[in-house]
Image (tube, grey):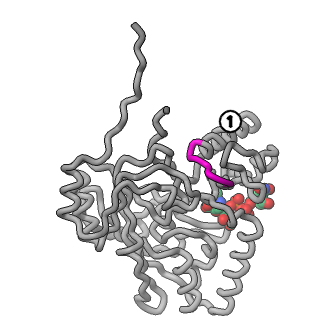
Amino acid sequence: MRFRRNKKKKKGLTSEQKQAMESQLRGTLEYDVPMSTRTTIKVGGPADAVFAPADPEDVATFVRLASDLHIPYEILGGGTNLLVKDGGYRGVMLDLREGFGYLDRLDDLRVKVGSGAALPTLVARCREWGLKGCEGLAGIPGTVGGAFAMNAGTHEGDVSMVTEQITIVTRSGRVKKLGREELPFEYRDLPLKKGTIILDGTLKFSEGDPKELGEVISESKARRKATQPLDKPNAGCIFKNPEKVPAGKIIDDLGLKGVRLRGAMISDVHANFIVNVGDATAKDILGLMSMIKEKVKDAHGLKLEPEVRIIGEDEEEK
Ligand code: EPU
């Protein structure tokens, strides 16, 4: 007798989980949302649900439900640095843009900003207000929450440098404030406990001149436009920079620019970007990433680490 081993299909949300969310949450809940429509690289299978919470209490209720009913969740951010695999995500993606898009000036130098606010909006508003400190982030897409979570930055500086405090919801559903000294920022990372949700932050700037800030912002945007493939769907830099030489230079020097795997291509503008040149799948992108890692390991003995967040599961074999 011959046996065929079937991979066990992971189940989506149960009706008990759906009913509990529908009856207790106040924000917007959508089911079976293709992540190709919510990520800038435009790939990814469906998330079981996307939930846009109404306010902090709604987030706390969700987290408690998720813990009681074992519902996995992830934060969507702006979908700019996220690669969801082709089989989709079994769980709930939280979208904070609806309920947490606020941006308020607290006093002369401090601003309170919701995780769902767009990072480019923060940069533009700080320029108008004459607040110096985040102009180096000009041109980085995504949300402020995502920028905190990955300590977004450029050679000019990163988010940690202006952060005074952030508000989080803990895995047990408690709203809590963390001061700068409690925030373990690293290069392109803010490692908090798994399941923690960042709701907003207080940023502290110094005084700046709107005209000068505007010039720095324009230069920074122009530089990115000239050196990055911003006209094609992408997920930002794919790998973190190793200590000595930037990943883009290493990959470029190996002659890998322009290499394609079906719909995905190593950008011919910046080698640390993979672009979707037409109906790419997550498998194509991950395939290129593995190929790059292998070549870099062989040539330099270096292990490149992804900068892009990879979640979800592979598509079932057909
Ligand atoms: N380079 C090459 N070939 C390439 C790409 C880059 O030789 O194909 C060289 C450049 O000429 C330069 C050096 O590598 O000498 C560094 O390149 P670049 O200035 O473009 O910066 P990067 O280190 O590749 C970092 C951030 C970017 C950010 C830029 C601009 C990381 C992993 N990347 O890139 O962030 O936009 O600086 O400040 O830290 C992102 O986070 O998604 C991202 C793209």
Identity of the residue drawn at 52% across and 83% down: 205
**Residue 167 on the magenta segment:** no
Count residues near mark 1 (Cα–Cα under 10 Å), then give few for <14, some for 14-19, many for 20+.
some
Secondary structure mostly taken by the magenta-highlighted segment of the chain: loop
Left or right? Give the position of 108 relative to 169.
right
Identity of the residue drawn at 72% across and 37% down: 295
* Residue 209 at x, y percent in the picture: 63, 92
Which residues lie in the magenta part?
A: 277-283
Could you say which quadrant of the image residue 275 lies in? bottom right
Nearer-the-camera pick, 38 or 162: 38
Nearer-the-camera pick, 147 or 85: 85
Q: Disc 1 designates what residue?
A: 294
Rendered view: 203 above or below 106: above
* Residue 214 at x, y percent in the picture: 66, 87
Rendered view: 255 above or below 109: above
Nearer-the-camera pick, 67 or 174: 67
